[in-house]
Structures are given as C-alpha cells and as structure tokens.
Amino acid sequence: MFKRFFDPATIYARRAQRSMDEARMAALEHEGAAEHHAALARMYRERVARLQAELEPQQAQSSLVPDPGGQVARITALKKREDAGAAKASLLAQGLAG
C-alpha cells in the first residue's frame, strides 16, 4: 500500500505530469497574450493609417515645408521645460543642508 506513495517511479511520474500540466497552462497563457498583442498591433496600424489620411490633406494645402523624400519623422524632440533650471538651483548637494 505504501509502495504506491513512496515508489520513486510513481513520484517521478507525478512530478512529470505536474510539470507537463504547468507547461500546458503557460503555453495557453502565452498564446492568449500573443493574440492580445497582435490585436493591439493591428489596432495601432489602423490608427496610424487613419491619422496619416487625416494629415495628408493638410500637408497638401500647406506647401511651406518641402517633403524630404516622403518620409515622416517617427520621433519628435521633447520640449524642455523653462522652469527646469530653477528647480535644479533649489536643490542642495548632500551634506550642505544645515
């Protein structure tokens, strides 16, 4: 009777079964996440196409800036805050506070 619980082959078989069940669950979770990310990517591609379609009439009307090779800048520079220098000046170096 106790051989069923303490037999090394039985213990290994149960551990292997548990590992296989965990791997199947992980695969299922990752497949669900992949479907979610694919849907997000599709949504953002559609959004880019819609926004480009909205911007094209404006770009055709305003010919002030020549189009450099038809490429649209993907990354725009961040604007620096004017009060950033004042914030840095108000900070004290370590050990200088009284």
Image (tube, helix red, strand yellow):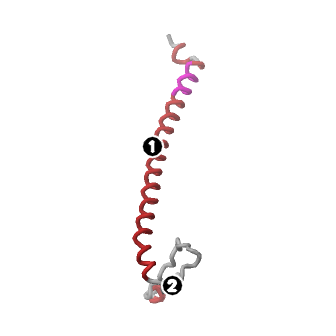
- Give the x, y percent position of residue 95: 52, 82
Q: Mark 2 falls on what kind of element?
A: loop
Type of the residue with mark 1: Gly
Q: Is residue 18 magenta?
A: no
- Give the x, y percent position of residue 11: 55, 22
Q: What residue is pinned by disc 2?
A: 65
User: Toward the viewer: 41 or 5?
Assistant: 41
- Give the x, y percent position of residue 31: 48, 42
What residue is at 53 percent from the left and 23 percent from the top? 14
Q: Earlier in the sequence, mark 2 or mark 1?
A: 1
Asked if residue 33 is positioned above or below residue 48 in the image, the reply reads: above
Asked if residue 10 is positioned above or below residue 47 in the image, the reply reads: above
Q: Residue furthest top?
A: 1
Q: Are marks 2 and 1 in contact (CB under 8 Å)?
A: no
What residue is at 59 percent from the left and 20 percent from the top? 8
Q: Mark 1 falls on what kind of element?
A: helix
In front of the other: label 2 or label 1?
A: 2
Q: Which mark is residue 92?
A: none
User: Toward the viewer: 61 or 40?
Assistant: 61
Residue 40 lies in quadrant: bottom left
Asked if residue 80 is positioned above or below residue 19 in the image, the reply reads: below
Q: Main secondary structure of the magenta part?
A: helix
Q: Which residues are magenta?
A: 10-17
Asked if residue 96 is positioned above or below residue 24 in the image, the reply reads: below
- Other residues around mark 2 within 10 Å, as few (<14) / some (14–19) / many (≥20): few
What residue is at 46 percent from the left and 51 percent from the top? 37
Type of the residue with mark 2: Val
Q: What residue is pinned by disc 1?
A: 32
- Give the x, y percent position of residue 12: 58, 23
